[in-house]
Amino acid sequence: MTKLLNEFWVTFSSIFTGLGVTWRHLFKRSVTVQYPEERLEMPKGVRHQLYVNIDDCIGCNLCSKACPVNCIEIETVKSTDEDDLGETSTGHKKRLWVTKFDIDMAKCMYCDLCVPPCPTDCIYMIEDYEYSKYDRDDLIFKFSDLSPEKVEEVKKKAEEEAARKKAEKEKQAAKKKAEKEKKQAEGKKDEKDKKDSPKTSKD
Ligand code: SF4
Ligand code: SF4
């Protein structure tokens, strides 16, 4: 009987404790934010979506190397001697075409490790946190602004220049080799002439 009474007491006291909390909150100011009509101001240094100012990117790959989950994919193509890609706003000379700069925000863990190594401060987090998608692939953000045609064009030009430089290098090497062989042959001939000359004087 005592056990039963004890259980009744626990049950009723729990119910009234819970109701007490509910009643207390009925008279307090509501703290619910009516999102999306209402939005809280984000604190400083908050980590949200990554953004790349591609005009300032030199394709150095430092951000990608720093990422612990490999969610940054960068591809670059060397510019040719006749290309002038200009400078970044921080004064760094641009020598590479950034043909691909993808960040997979579905993999990103918002650690911010990719931001500090950037020499031109062009990768950073912005305040946009509303980018949920139905398809995971839509969370791959593409920052390269080159069209597929332009990418093909710069790749072709880079290949042609590399082939031309390689051919020139080979030509120079062959020329040097020929000169060296010629000198060696001349040296041998001089040696032979020296050896032969005393004989001739004796005769
Ligand atoms: S925040 Fe972290 S996980 Fe996300 S891209 Fe940068 S380094 Fe990778
Ligand atoms: S570290 Fe900066 S400059 Fe280098 S590839 Fe990344 S975003 Fe571009």
Image (cartoon, grey):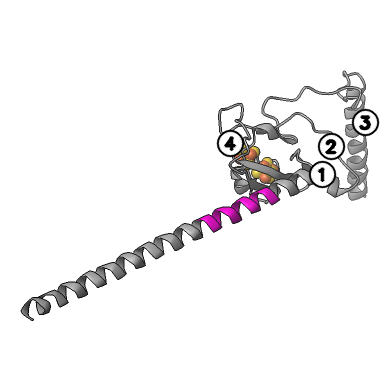
Q: Residue at x 93, y 48 (%)?
A: 4
Q: Is residue 196 left or right of residue 71?
A: left
**Residue located beneath label 3 in the image:** 19
Pinpoint residue 122: horizontal percent, then vertical percent: 65, 33
Residue pointed to by mark 4: 116
- The image shows residue 114 at horizontal and vertical percentages of 63, 41
Mark 1 and mark 2: Cα distance apart in space: 8 Å
Q: Nearer the viewer, mark 4 or mark 3?
A: 4
Number of dots carrying numbers: 4
Specify which label sits upstream in the sequence, 2 or 4.
Answer: 4
When the figure is inspected, residue 16 is found, relative to residue 141, above or below; the finding is: above
Q: Amino acid at mark 3?
A: Leu
Q: Are marks 1 and 2 in contact (CB under 8 Å)?
A: yes
**Real-space CA distance between mark 2 and mark 4, rounded to the nearest whole angstrom:** 24 Å
Mark positioned earlier in the residue sequence (4 or 1): 4
| Amino acid at the residue labelled 2 | Tyr
